[in-house]
Image (cartoon, rainbow, N blue to C red):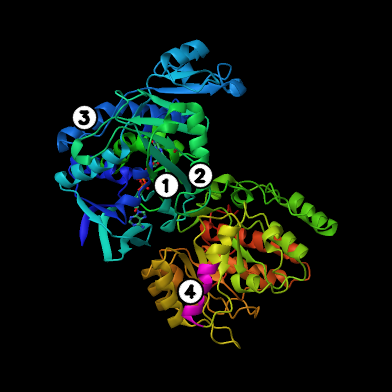
Amino acid sequence: MTSEIVIIGGGVIGLAIAIELKLRGTYVTVLCRDFSAAASHAAAGMLAPDAENIPNEAMRSLCWRSRALYPDWTHKLEELTGLNTGYWPCGILAPVFEESRGGGEENTPLSATSPLSPAYWLDKEAIHQYQPGLGAEIAGGWWYPEDAQVDNRALAHVLWTAAESLGVELKEGITVEAIRQQQGQVIGVQTNAGVISAAHYVLAAGAWSNELLPLPVRPRKGQMLSVQVPEFVPELPLQRVLFGQDIYIVPRRDRAASLKEKRSLIIGATVEDVGFTPHNTPDGIQTLLQAAIRLYPQLQHYPIQEFWWGFRPATPDELPILGTSHCKNLTLATGHYRNGILLAPITATLIADLICQQKSDPLLSDFHYSRFHAQPSTHTSMLTHSANFSNGHRPAVSSQNSELSEKLERRLPPIQTSVTQDSALIIAGKTFQSRLLTGTGKYRSIEEMQQSVAASDCQIVTVAVRRVQTKAPGHEGLAEALDWTKIWMLPNTAGCQTAEEAIRVARLGREMAKLLGQEDNNFVKLEVIPDLKYLLPDPIGTLEAAEQLVKEGFAVLPYINADPMLAKRLEDVGCATVMPLASPIGSGQGLKTTANIQIIIENATVPVVVDAGIASPSQAAEAMELGADALLINSAIALAQNPAVMARAMNLATVAGRLAYLAGRMPIKDYASPSSPLTGIITS
Ligand code: FAD
Ligand code: GLY
């Protein structure tokens, strides 16, 4: 099936984008696993850039722009569908308790500085007069007249109906299992109903986005409940949102009688880092009720209506991920955390501008996914300055090693920047500055391993999941031995003899990476090796396992014999790299498969990482000169007499080989050619 644009995710973000794209004349399909599980249904619907007191300036601008779009946007949707979204510019009152006066008047909110979005301080008397029924300990508070609310459940329903009536193809119950990529393009999405292809794709899968791409989006659970306003209370007692510390109360007016929604007060919300753990808990609900009653005591007598929970899509800096991706035809719109309802209209506008007109709003640059990538360290500065050893985490090498390093450092002349421009190594959308990958096996001690990893300046270290599990020598304490905030773990399936085993171990590897704090790490180095004498990989088992792991959302880096046909097949099933061997693992025989590796490089559209067999820096440089994108070297470093110095040498060789490849070597000639040409010589 082919569609012009496929959107993955049918929450408010996916639907709002779908409608905007459809209105601009594109053919759109939305794939949605579970409409009712979306955070969009669980939210409180506050449009609260001021009350949320957002510290990031770009985010504040984005939120303000979106809030300003709300009246026209909801009006347009209501006209299209004849349904009510419950948009209500009711303002938000943020009361402050006696004991937290420090968070009160003296702590002017950021919005108070903007004439477009004013904030007013109300003292004790004013606030109690303005909002009767507040808790007696409230000593004052801020009034944000521009903040508003929308009934997010009604909005989700309206968006779905509007999309349907405009002719957006809505496919509920469809799970995208993997995004298939080739040559920097998405070529289709693997779903539970087969492969679906389109010219362009948008990832808007909320808290689940990380199952499909290695983006740092994690679920942040929020529990909520609502109470019903009893019929004997003639008017809705709250006419504005109350936004306290760790608690808010959102009044909801009567909606269409057909929807049987009564007047209610929504009470929220917990903020919990518990993964996708479902359900409400007594502790969560008790905390909310206690805080809500303190803020607005009369609700303690109201009947409880409903409990629910949802998963906010959170990023490490709490800002959304918007804009282009590592694939030309894939746009990202995820990670909206606490403000996805608010940000739906501006997200839809900016993303549609980007896709339809290639117009990139300057604000988008603050929300680009690349902000999470490692900062360039010496890996490129090795290319732009002189070869030096400082990378912000200088290895704790022995004094002998450090002396050697310094000597080397002093001797190396600076390199002209003009010849050294290089792009970074990108694997499955993640950028790495170093093109040398190393391992943790075979070292004589943990300290030697630590020194070597640091000296190699690598950013990816492969770890044998099975050896960690069985606490094999050298693999105890690995979690603490390396700084996993700086080094990307590449779990490998070493020791697996069948595809089934490798798949099982890969899943364990993903959990292991999570335990080390790499929630978004879906990488696996796939090794299926039944033959214990030569340690040669099984091509059929590797292909089978790769196919399954790609479907499960892994970024698969398969270790293979240097077989160009197999490399192509693995690329076709969606592997993130291919890793042909130079010679058998640990043999130290060097480059024995040059001709085949050359063919693989010539035909590959994913990075080619030469793995296994490289024993010396000259061989490392040679592999890079061929045009390999990176090298994985373990034994040659670990088994050297001085591993840390060899690690540094391998780093320099990798960089040298890469530079030589970029520089383009001179042609080979059959006969000698004098270094000083004779042409143009003045003869007497
Ligand atoms: P979602 O709404 O979660 O939708 C994602 C959709 O993608 C889901 O339907 C899911 O089934 C689908 N999906 C996921 N993976 C796949 C896949 N592989 N294949 C197919 N489909 C897939 N925001 C505000 O602005 N104001 C608030 O007051 C507010 N309060 C909140 C209170 C709570 C308790 C919570 C949890 C959130 C709150 N939010 C609020 C945040 C807001 O709800 C989210 O930021 C927003 O809903 C994110 O929208 P989304 O479309 O990106 O994700
Ligand atoms: N924006 C309110 C919440 O996320 O709980």
Q: Circle 1 sits in a helix, a strand or a loop, which is it?
A: strand
Chief SS of the magenta region: helix
Q: Which residues are magenta?
A: 498-508
Q: Is residue 93 magenta?
A: no
Q: Circle 2 sits in a helix, a strand or a loop, which is it?
A: helix
Q: Earlier in the sequence, mark 1 or mark 4?
A: 1
What amino acid does circle 3 point to? His
Are dots 1 and 4 in contact, CB under 8 Å? no
| Front tag of 4 and 2 | 2
Residue pointed to by mark 2: 284
> Any atom of ligand 1 within 8 Å of the CB at mark 1?
yes
Look at 19% across and 42% down and name the residue there: 162
Q: Which mark is residue 309?
A: 1
Q: Is residue 520 above or below residue 222?
A: below
How far apart are the two marked residues, 3 and 1, measured between alpha carbons?
A: 29 Å
Are dots 3 and 1 in contact, CB under 8 Å? no
Look at 57% across and 20% down and name the residue there: 107
Quarter holding the N terminus? bottom left
Residue pointed to by mark 4: 503
Residue pointed to by mark 3: 75
How far from the left and from the top, in percent, is residue 129? 44, 12
- Out of 677 and 172, give the one closest to the viewer: 172
How far from the left and from the top, in percent, is residue 478? 69, 63
Q: Circle 3 sits in a helix, a strand or a loop, which is it?
A: helix
Look at 43% across and 41% down and name the residue there: 224
What amino acid does circle 1 point to? Trp
- Indicate the quadrant of ligand 2 in the picture: top left
Are dots 1 and 2 in contact, CB under 8 Å? yes
How far from the left and from the top, in percent, is residue 510? 53, 64
